[in-house]
Image (cartoon, grey):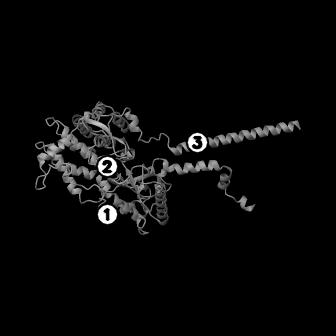
């Protein structure tokens, strides 16, 4: 009896209202579903690394109760960026090493996280991310060393890490210096932040535990699929233009020029419809991500897949973190140079470089591409081909982020073009030019549907059939976009509130009825 009287109130609540307790438990659990911790099925370079927390937002109080009080190192990246892929293994190693940092090292408090700007576009725009990879250190306010007041959980400071991640020593020193200067790190705070990091890592481990990976053997596709060209065009319009925006004359002029050469060289990709959207912006319509992406959807770009899950054929890698978008962009650029009118006013390579200057989010890739000294006097087809092979030669020895099943090779090889090399093994550029113009030749009326080895329909160059379009392009594209008009925890909170109110009203009414019945019985007696 004594034990029952001493029973805590929450235990009595669980016994009397088990269903309501379960609902409240779900509300607390679904705080992670508030769009801050990324879904495990979402595209990420860090899916298999529990030491890196995948984020979709930076509303820290929604991630974990201790998140606003601890330092966070966040890499903003794009999973289609070659440099981002190359540093991913090193970042995973850095993140895993935080757990074994010495007790007096402030890095021990840090949680490593990542945001994929190709998926979490609004978060990257919120933090004005124009190039990737970009490292930010987020710190709680009012936590300076020696400060008596508690940390301000309502606002986090953000610091851009200037040191190159490749120079790990300098990178670590910069992060340590910022933390020491702006945060008081005592034993209790250290324990709190370490505990939070372990909790989030355990959550990620549990959430991805039931996932299964495909064991199908990978076979490289050597055929050119038009949907890969369309897929690259769709993604660069959908992601990269949306990330940068068209609020200033430079980006607006660059995208307009680029769309004009795409319209001229590759009719049927939908550039004409996007040029109309650009004209509206020039006439005073305010740019917004939502309206621009609506225009991209309405352009009927005939790629294969969905906005967040573009499917690749020619550019398919042995895993989703290999090849894909960068490969597709090269196909798009080559197709432009081959099919654009050589006598036109606009030099295609100048238009491409200007577009890359403003919209290619991979900073290192952008700088390398802008270093190419293209001229008006030489054949743009061969100039871009030489540039691409130079890149392949430079990246061939690099293993980080490279597909082990698709080595960087000089294109075209003998398997595809037997005439492209002379007896000494060197390229015969006259034969290469003939081959490239045939390989990338674009004819909308010569694109037909077919099925691959898995029975999936796709599009590739084949003479004699019209180019297919989706009958309802908005529905096709939107099938792959997740919309959450009401966050789950908000819905459940409202539901629980209504349930509690109804239960109270019902209980009050029941007491009133019982009281009336009791009075009525006493009057009879």
- Quarter of the picture containing the N terminus is bottom right
Q: Quadrant of the C terminus?
A: top right
Which is in the foreground here, disc 2 or disc 1?
A: 2
Residue 398 shows in this picture: yes
**How many numbered tags mark residues here?**
3
**Farthest right residue in view:** 525
Q: Is residue 88 above or below residue 335?
A: below
Say which of marks 1 and 3 sits in front: 3
Q: Nearer the viewer, residue 266 or 507?
A: 266
- Is 189 displayed left or right of 398 in the figure? right
Q: Which residue is mark 1?
A: 168
Foreground mark, 2 or 3, reads: 2
Residue 316 shows which numbered tag?
2
Note whether residue 350 is visible.
no
Q: Earlier in the sequence, mark 1 or mark 3?
A: 1
Question: How would you rate the neighbour count of disc 2 (Cα within 10 Å): few for under 14, some for 14-19, many for 20 or more?
Answer: many
Q: Secondary structure at mark 2?
A: loop
Q: Which residue is labeled 3 in the image?
A: 495
Secondary structure state at the residue bearing disc 3: helix
């Amino acid at each position: 009896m004594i034990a029952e009287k001493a029973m805590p109130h929450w235990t009595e609540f669980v016994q009397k209202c088990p269903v309501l307790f379960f609902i409240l438990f779900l509300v607390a659990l679904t705080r992670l579903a508030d769009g801050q911790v990324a879904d495990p099925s979402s595209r990420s370079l860090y899916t298999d690394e529990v030491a890196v927390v995948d984020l979709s937002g930076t509303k820290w109080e929604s991630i974990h109760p201790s998140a606003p009080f601890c330092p966070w190192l966040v890499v903003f990246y794009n999973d289609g960026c070659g440099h981002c892929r190359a540093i991913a293994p090193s970042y995973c190693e850095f993140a895993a090493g935080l757990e074994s940092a010495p007790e007096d090292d402030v890095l021990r408090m840090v949680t490593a996280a990542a945001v994929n700007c190709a998926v979490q576009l609004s978060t990257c725009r919120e933090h004005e991310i124009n190039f990737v990879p970009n490292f930010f250190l987020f710190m709680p306010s009012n936590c300076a060393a020696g400060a008596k007041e508690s940390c301000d959980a309502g606002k986090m400071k953000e610091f851009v890490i200037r040191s190159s991640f490749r120079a790990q020593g300098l990178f670590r020193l910069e992060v340590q210096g910022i933390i020491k200067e702006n945060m008081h790190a005592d034993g209790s705070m250290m324990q709190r932040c370490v505990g939070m990091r372990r909790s989030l890592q355990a959550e990620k481990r549990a959430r991805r535990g039931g996932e299964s990976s495909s064991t199908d053997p990978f076979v490289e596709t050597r055929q050119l699929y038009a949907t890969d060209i369309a897929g690259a065009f769709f993604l660069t319009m959908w992601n990269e233009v949306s990330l940068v925006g068209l609020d200033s004359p430079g980006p607006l002029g660059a995208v307009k020029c680029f769309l004009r050469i795409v319209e001229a060289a590759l009719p049927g990709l939908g550039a004409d419809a996007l040029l109309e959207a650009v004209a509206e912006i020039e006439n005073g319509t305010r740019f917004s991500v939502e309206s621009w992406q609506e225009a991209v959807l309405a352009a009927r770009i005939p790629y294969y897949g969905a906005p967040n899950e573009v499917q690749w054929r020619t550019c398919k890698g042995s895993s989703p973190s290999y090849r894909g978008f960068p490969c597709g962009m090269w196909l798009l650029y080559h197709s432009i140079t081959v099919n654009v009118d050589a006598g036109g006013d606009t030099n295609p390579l100048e238009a491409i470089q200007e577009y890359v200057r403003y919209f290619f989010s991979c900073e290192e890739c952008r700088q390398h591409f802008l270093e190419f000294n293209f001229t008006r006097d030489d054949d743009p087809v061969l100039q871009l081909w030489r540039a691409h092979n130079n890149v392949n030669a430079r990246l061939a020895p690099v293993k980080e982020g490279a597909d082990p099943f698709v080595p960087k090779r000089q294109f075209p090889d003998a398997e595809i073009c037997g005439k492209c090399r002379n007896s000494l093994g060197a390229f015969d550029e006259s034969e290469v030019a003939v081959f490239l113009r045939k390989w990338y030749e674009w004819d909308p009326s010569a694109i037909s549907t077919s099925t691959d080895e898995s029975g999936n329909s796709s599009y590739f160059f084949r003479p004699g059939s019209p180019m297919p379009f989706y009958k309802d392009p908005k529905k096709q594209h939107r099938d792959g976009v997740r919309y959450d008009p009401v966050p789950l925890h908000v819905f459940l909170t409202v539901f629980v509130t209504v349930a509690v109110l109804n239960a109270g009203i019902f209980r009050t009414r029941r007491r009133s009825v019982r009281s009336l019945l009791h009075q009525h019985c006493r009057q009879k007696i």
